[in-house]
Amino acid sequence: MAAHRKPAHRKPKQSLFSGPAARTAATLALAGAATATCLDGAAQAEPQLTPAQVKAKVDRLYHEAEAATEKYNGAKETAARSEKSVDALRDEAARRTERLNTARDALGAYATAQYRSAGVDPAVRLALSSDPDEYLERASFEDRAGDRQAGAINGVRRQISDLAQVRARAEDELEVLAARRADLKKHKDEVRTKLSGARKLLATLTAAQRAAYERSADAAHGGTDRADRSAPRGSVAAPNARAAQAVDFAYGALGKPYVWGATGPSSFDCSGLTQAAWRAAGVSLPRTTYTQINAGQRLSRSELAPGDLVFFYPGVTHVGLYIGGGQMIHAPRPGAPVRIAPISEMPFAGATRVA
């Protein structure tokens, strides 16, 4: 039988994407891809910043990092308090457990004696039960014990109840502690992110531009020569012995590095320096700028005397120790050591006299 043949008048079926149509589609696709690439590159390209713009951004990041540092300091302080509370509750639970076991041991000895004579009283069995809930629910049986043991059984019941309350408080405090540790981590991550951003921006500058930035930052924060511990002292005397001790400590810290979260003795952040200075004078200050501002008598700028705490920026995110003559000693920022600087260099937010 002859093979089936296609009719001669039919042409082979042409693919939609072959021949002239394919060439046209390919051309359009390549053009579109090139356009998209150009647009994508334009969208992703970072505009080249001038040194002045880099400086402004770096300064802003350092300031934001300091604000985050103070929040970190506060979160660290509250987390530490929660840890102490948890430890205290655990210790209390251990002591109560020991007392409860002692009381139950005494009842056990009594139960043994009862068994040898006439069997164990049901109230005593319940007091010795490993299931405190069962004991508490059926504690009415205690009146079946002898008068001599009723008080002891009652005492065990109270101890079980008290121990359960202590353990419940410890569990609650553990939840609080977990939340505070999460808050602490959040602020720590924020500080690191801000400082990392500042370092990356500075890395875009040439060595000469970075040196110029550091010189301008030093000049804005009092100058490198004022970070020397041999810097001459002001002529204004501190109002009392404690303030004089705090000022002496601050002079002794000149030149030491700024490290966020540090309270000395080898490095400081801003509130860590003021806290350490007044600790040397026998006065305990809270940890953060926004708590230190409320740690004493509030003052106007015209009332300042050496030893007073001076605060800056609307969010009260920076603090220094006033030394007279419109000057303070402070820990400025990463890369800038503890130094003397004019209080006029930053937006003044208030002042406090500690003692």
Image (spheres, rainbow, N blue to C red):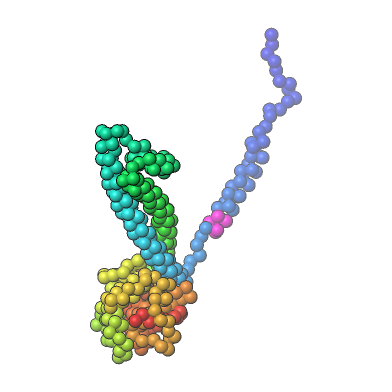
Q: Residue at x 26, y 70 (%)?
A: 265
Q: Quadrant of the N terminus?
A: top right
Tell me which corner region of the image, top left, top right, bottom left or bottom right, holds residue 146: top left
Q: Which residue shows up at 28% across the image and 76% down it?
A: 282
In the rendered image, the residue lying farthest to the front is: 147
Q: Quadrant of residue 214?
A: bottom left
Would you place residue 169 above or below residue 10 in this image?
below
Choose between 45 and 11: the one closer to the eye: 45
Position of the C terminus, as image quadrant, is bottom left
Q: Position of residue 261 (x, y in %)?
A: 35, 66
17 vs 276: above or below: above
Q: Is residue 116 above or below residue 342?
A: above
Instruction: Kindly tell me whether residue 18 is visible in this rendering.
Output: yes
Question: Which residue is located at x 39 percent, y 43 percent?
Answer: 143
Where residue 2 sits: x, y (%)? 69, 11
Q: From the viewer's side, name the closer residue of 276 and 1.
A: 276
Q: Which residues are magenta?
A: 39-43
Q: Quadrant of residue 348?
A: bottom left
Q: Residue at x 27, y 84 (%)?
A: 241
Q: Is residue 332 magenta?
A: no
